[in-house]
Image (tube, rainbow, N blue to C red):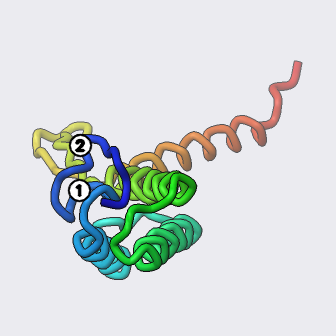
Amino acid sequence: MVLASASAAASRGTAGPLDVSRPADLVNTQISTIRADLAKGELYSEISAGEQAKVSDALTRIQTAIDRSGGAELSSGQQVSVFNDQEIVNTVLTRAKDDSRMICKRTRAVGSNMVTSQCMTVAQRRALSRDSQREMNDIQRNRPLPER
């Protein structure tokens, strides 16, 4: 209805990617669901405030274009604009959802046979790795040179 083409992967329910090729009432429902998920902060917990604003602005532009069309086909320029906004929303939310995925590793402490689970999100693991690397670099830079 809104766009003539959409990817097959985007044709799933409201839990899937935003799909503006569906009827206007379904798109509005999907936008409402995305806004609710963003407000809860659980599904997209790793999304930054700037990215949230970008998604919210794109959703507003999509909803405005759909509401203005009144059920009629959008012009080519409007279709391109709505499709680009859909891509912004789907890209940001997919990345945020992937970063929020919880991964647990079972490890043994050195000198022990007891196995413990360490659970962190992908983003937490990335931040831990980045911080550890930064600390090692700082230690190496600030270490006094051996005297000769």
Q: Residue at x 54, y 72 (%)?
A: 57
Residue 18 appears anywhere in the view: no
- State which quadrant residue 19 falls in: bottom left
Residue 22 appears anywhere in the view: yes
Question: Vertical placement of 108 versus 121: above or below?
Answer: above
Q: Which of marks 1 and 2 is nearer the N terminus?
A: 2
User: Residue 131 placed where, x, y %?
Assistant: 55, 49
Numbered circle sitting on residue 91: none
- Residue of label 1: 16
Front residue of this view, candidates 131 and 6: 6
Q: Is mark 2 on a helix, strand or loop?
A: helix
- The answer to whether marks 1 and 2 mark residues whose Cβ atoms lie closer than 8 Å is yes
Q: Residue at x 31, y 80 (%)?
A: 36
> Going by the picture, which residue comes out furthest to the left?
114
- State which quadrant residue 74 falls in: bottom left
Front residue of this view, candidates 141 and 40: 40
> Going by the picture, which residue comes out furthest to the top?
148
Question: What amino acid is found at the position of numbered circle 1 in the picture?
Answer: Gly
- Residue of label 2: 9
Number of numbered discs = 2
Question: What amino acid is found at the position of numbered circle 2 in the picture?
Answer: Ala
Q: Which residue is drawn at 35% across and 48% down?
A: 4
